[in-house]
Image: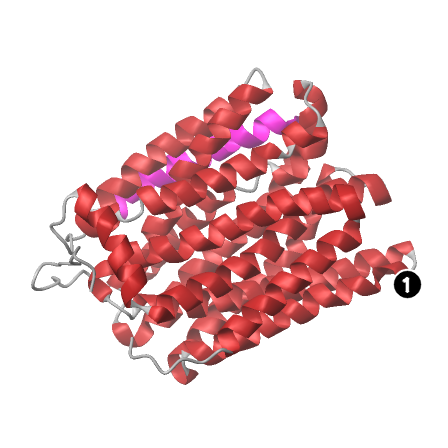
């Protein structure tokens, strides 16, 4: 074992139960906070001209947000094991609301990029909410509860594109950020009134807490495998969604509202969260990870048939593929969370931080490489990239190790 020990308090005090209203609060908070990462994607076509910024520079907006999220998960999310998660959630909600407001009033692209990075950092509020739900849930229902909260989170990811595309087309892109800021402020007020306090599970100081991430990573092969597989799936996911609006605008001459509407197709994939959670409770998460990764790879691969179809059929194929790969990615994520949360209950925030850091590094890398692939090889370059990454994720899940977690 590493010289840095992962120490916890001797007993983890019991937490109050979960009421339906509290589950709704957690799901809504997770969804609205993580939605902040994706509002910009359908608006890139109209945002650039308004700020007098080129396509390449505007393309850095979602990349900055995803990068901020990855950094925030790594540097801030572990604090949930050391301090009361309720206090952390309230502080992040206030700062996220402020960051979104700065985005809405940004006078230029530099301001927007800086504020987008801050949005990513504070949107890790979602990664404090999910471990909170896992802590409050009875062990026999943990997969179901996490799946329900993840449904809210995933609907936030996918419907955010629908909402931002529609609002941007009718009221301007700045209105999207202002409305988002108000929604987070509301969640903060409701959480202040309804969220219980949480007992810390470790007394490590911040330096030792961060050092313990290394010990956890080395100690658990199951954690490394889950993080690598989910990161590869996120790579393809990020490549698709970060380039879709540009492709639709250039190839089919569709605006931000149409690009955002594709989120409705992906929203169907959010149904995978509770189903995957229940299946993971009954049959184990390993099976769900393989089924999800396999569905994702097949869904991306089907888009290679696009050049053989007329324009209307191509759009239909993209819709069907989006439903399939979103379903697969989200099912695999819930199964990975169920698996990881069971490794060491007292370190859930840190385990979650490692899993999601890998995931969002993959998503940010996919967004960046996807933009290059679209510029160099067109839409088929993005399809090949996404298919290869998801196939690699399936290979990671199929590689079995007989290691005691």
Q: Magenta part mainly helix, strand or loop? A: helix
Left or right of residue 259: residue 215:
left
| Mark 1 surroundings: few (<14), some (14-19) or many (≥20) residues within 10 A | few
- The magenta stretch is 171-195
Left or right of residue 128: residue 379:
right
Residue pictured at 20% horizontal, 49% vertical: 209
Left or right of residue 261: residue 30:
left
Measured as percent of width and height from the top left, residue 192 is found at: 26, 40
Measured as percent of width and height from the top left, residue 391 is found at: 62, 69
Element under disc 1: helix
Question: In terms of image quadrants, where is residue 124?
Answer: top left
Measured as percent of width and height from the top left, residue 389 is found at: 61, 61
| The residue positioned farthest toward the left in the image shown | 10
Q: Is residue 350 magenta?
A: no
Residue holding disc 1: 308
Measured as percent of width and height from the top left, residue 294 is found at: 60, 74
Of 248 and 132, the residue lying toward us: 248
Left or right of residue 399: residue 187:
left
């Amino acid at each position: 074992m590493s010289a840095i020990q992962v120490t916890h308090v001797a007993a983890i005090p019991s937490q109050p139960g979960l009421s339906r209203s509290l589950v709704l609060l957690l799901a809504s908070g997770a969804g609205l906070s993580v939605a902040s990462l994706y509002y910009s994607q359908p608006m890139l076509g109209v945002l650039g001209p308004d700020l007098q910024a080129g396509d390449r520079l505007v393309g850095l907006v979602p990349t900055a947000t995803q990068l901020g999220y990855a950094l925030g998960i790594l540097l801030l999310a572990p604090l949930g094991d050391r301090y009361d998660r309720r206090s952390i959630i309230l502080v992040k909600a206030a700062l996220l609301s402020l960051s979104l407001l700065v985005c809405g009033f940004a006078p230029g692209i530099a301001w927007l990029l800086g504020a987008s990075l801050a949005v990513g950092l504070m949107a890790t509020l979602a990664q404090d909410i999910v471990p909170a739900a896992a802590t409050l849930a009875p062990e026999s229902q943990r997969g179901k509860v996490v799946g329900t909260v993840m449904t809210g989170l995933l609907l936030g990811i996918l419907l955010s594109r629908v909402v931002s595309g529609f609002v941007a087309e009718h009221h301007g892109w700045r209105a999207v950020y202002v409305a988002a800021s108000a929604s987070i402020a509301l969640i903060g007020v409701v959480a202040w009134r309804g969220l219980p306090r949480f007992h810390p599970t470790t007394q490590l100081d911040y330096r030792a807490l961060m050092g313990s991430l290394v010990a956890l990573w080395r100690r658990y092969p199951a954690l490394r495998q889950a993080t690598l597989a989910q990161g590869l799936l996120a790579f393809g996911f990020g490549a698709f969604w970060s380039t879709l609006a540009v492709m639709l605008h250039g190839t089919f001459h569709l605006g931000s509202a149409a690009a955002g509407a594709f989120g409705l197709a992906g929203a169907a994939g959010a149904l995978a969260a509770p189903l995957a959670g229940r299946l993971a409770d009954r049959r184990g998460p390993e099976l769900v990870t393989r089924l999800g990764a396999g569905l994702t790879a097949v869904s991306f691969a089907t888009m290679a048939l696009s050049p053989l179809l007329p324009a209307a059929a191509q759009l239909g194929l993209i819709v069907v593929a989006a439903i399939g790969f979103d379903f697969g990615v989200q099912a695999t994520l819930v199964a990975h969370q169920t698996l990881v949360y069971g490794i060491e209950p007292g370190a859930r925030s840190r385990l979650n931080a490692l899993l999601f850091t890998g995931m969002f590094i993959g998503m940010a890398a996919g967004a960046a490489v996807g933009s290059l692939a679209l510029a160099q090889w067109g839409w088929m370059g993005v399809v090949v990239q996404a298919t290869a990454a998801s196939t690699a994720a399936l290979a990671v899940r199929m590689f079995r190790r007989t290691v005691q977690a």
